[in-house]
């Protein structure tokens, strides 16, 4: 009996209920369709995945497919084997213009442009988008309508006007709006205004080597944020990033609006229902003093290892297409609020009446159907986002003014970017410290065993 070809697929466990069960089910379905293959799914820690992958590569273990959060786009490009060869192949080049692989229709060509563009470099789609999100505005329609706000605000000026109306109504929420002090919103504000954080086309036409956190677009965002806070409209929950605290404030009617990820749609619908208020979802508001340049994306993508034996390569390519097929992608959107990844998946949902019955879910996709934004790609993404959030925390606390705080942040960010580039490419591009999704001031965020394993592997 001929042995089966094993496909090692390493994915990031987002820890949602049943999340890894979903992957196990897709693997079993693929094995049934292709009995010559066994799909071995490995769950990686959300915060530790890039380090786990690098440590394994240092030990000579390379998965056929590995998933990286979008922050790590530059890291994945920079990953090398111990002998210095690129770890990952171009997905588009591996597909070679085919319309099917092992009978599985190729769907990579149908990925929505906003996601496809983010993972494209040199004109080639390098990896397969697997999870897609963007930023949206949530509104308590009961509070807004009682304050005379008939429509969801779409610009910064309209957000402020809505907050002023909420504040003027007796018995209204304590604050008009809240959002997490997280780098996502800095990225969104700059991208939607057509700005860039780095040179070389925001890291898209070449490696980002210079970064500026004090551009007019960034300073406009930080100044507006400060003004909203000073006027009592913005609720600062005090932590970085404080996702749960801002969510709870909105769910408890302490704010009338909340900026957050489109990934929160399901949770926010449930929270509004539980608290008994109406909910609207609107586009991420933009600075109406500047032309709107589109919304940036977040999420993750799956990278194909280079140099695989042909049966493994073909099986991995087929699996990547199967697991993102229209019906699977449509059903995954229903379950997790992830963006439907392809035009075909969106069309299926529309035909099924999903968006008509659940209009909250249509907004994120419709936002990305507009102008494409150019989200930044650079090394030590999480570290530099931490610099942004600390700079803003100083501004909100009155410890520094906007200009001085973000000028200092630029100098610190440039040091981090220079340090990353000095160590890239490599097995641990930029060093293990840069291989992270979020910054933690508490070293206990990683277990001692994890950190020891990474340190030993990096020394090798």
Image (cartoon, rainbow, N blue to C red):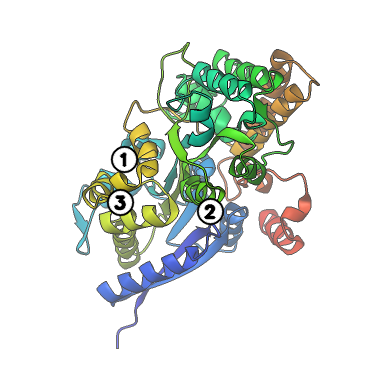
Q: How far is mark 3 from mark 1, CA to CA? A: 20 Å
Count the numbered circles shown.
3
Which mark is first along the chain, 1 or 3?
3
Please name the residue that numbered disc 2 is placed on.
83
Identify the secondary structure beneath mark 1. loop
Closer to the eye: label 3 or 2: 3
Residue 44: name its quadrant.
bottom right
Please name the residue that numbered disc 3 is placed on.
94
Identify the secondary structure beneath mark 2. loop
Q: Identify the residue at the far right of this view.
A: 399
Are the residues at dot 3 and dot 2 in contact (C-beta closer than 8 Å)?
no
Residue occupying image coordinates x 63% and y 41%: 430
Q: Identify the residue at the far top of this view.
A: 289
Q: Which mark is residue 154?
A: none
Q: Position of residue 310 (x, y in %)?
A: 31, 64
Specify whether 133 is left or right of 309. right
Residue occupying image coordinates x 48% and y 11%: 289
Front position in the image: 127 or 175:
175
Residue 408: name its quadrant.
top right
Count residues near mark 3 (Cα–Cα under 10 Å), then give few for <14, some for 14-19, many for 20+: some
Please name the residue that numbered disc 1 is placed on.
112
Q: How far is mark 1 from mark 2, CA to CA? A: 36 Å
Specify whether 453 is left or right of 158. right
Identify the secondary structure beneath mark 3. helix
Count residues near mark 1 (Cα–Cα under 10 Å), then give few for <14, some for 14-19, many for 20+: many
């Amino acid at each position: 009996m001929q042995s089966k070809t094993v496909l090692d697929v390493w994915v990031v466990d987002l820890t949602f209920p049943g999340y890894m069960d979903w992957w196990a089910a897709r693997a079993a379905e693929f094995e049934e369709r292709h009995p010559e293959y066994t799909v071995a799914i490995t769950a990686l820690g959300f915060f530790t995945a890039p380090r786990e992958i690098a440590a394994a590569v240092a030990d000579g273990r390379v998965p056929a497919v590995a998933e990286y959060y979008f922050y790590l786009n530059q890291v994945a490009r920079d990953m090398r084997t111990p002998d210095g060869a690129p770890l990952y192949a171009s997905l588009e080049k591996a597909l070679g213009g085919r319309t099917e692989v092992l009978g599985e229709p190729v769907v990579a060509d149908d990925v929505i442009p906003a996601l496809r563009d983010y993972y494209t470099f040199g004109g080639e789609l390098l990896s397969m988008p697997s999870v897609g999100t963007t930023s949206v505005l949530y509104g308590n329609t009961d509070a807004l309508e009682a304050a005379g706000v008939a429509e969801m605000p779409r610009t910064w000026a309209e957000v402020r006007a809505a907050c002023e109306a909420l504040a003027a109504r007796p018995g209204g929420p304590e604050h008009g709006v809240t959002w997490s002090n997280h780098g996502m919103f800095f990225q969104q504000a700059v991208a939607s205004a057509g700005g860039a954080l780095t040179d070389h086309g925001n890291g898209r036409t070449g490696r980002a080597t210079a970064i500026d956190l004090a551009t007019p677009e960034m300073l406009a965002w930080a100044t507006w944020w400060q003004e909203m806070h000073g006027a009592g409209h913005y609720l600062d929950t005090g932590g970085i990033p404080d996702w749960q605290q801002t969510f709870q404030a909105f769910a408890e009617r302490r704010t009338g609006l909340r900026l957050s990820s489109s990934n929160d749609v399901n949770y926010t619908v449930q929270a509004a229902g539980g608290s008994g208020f109406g909910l609207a979802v609107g586009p991420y508001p933009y600075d109406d003093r500047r032309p709107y340049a589109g919304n940036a994306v977040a999420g993750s993508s799956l990278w194909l290892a280079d140099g695989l034996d042909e049966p493994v390569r073909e099986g991995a390519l087929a699996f990547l297409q199967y697991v993102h097929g229209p019906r699977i992608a449509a059903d995954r959107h229903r379950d997790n609020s992830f963006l439907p990844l392809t035009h075909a998946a969106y069309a299926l949902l529309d035909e099924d009446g999903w968006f008509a019955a659940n209009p909250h879910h249509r907004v994120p996709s419709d936002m990305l159907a507009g102008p494409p934004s150019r989200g930044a790609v650079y090394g030590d993404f999480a570290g530099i986002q931490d610099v942004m959030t600390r700079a803003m925390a100083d501004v909100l606390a009155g410890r520094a003014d906007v200009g001085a705080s973000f000028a200092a942040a630029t100098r610190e960010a440039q040091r981090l970017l220079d340090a990353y580039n000095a160590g890239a490419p490599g097995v641990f591009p930029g060093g293990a410290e840069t291989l992270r999704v979020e910054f933690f001031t508490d070293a206990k965020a990683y277990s001692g065993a994890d950190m020891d394993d990474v340190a030993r592997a990096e020394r090798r």
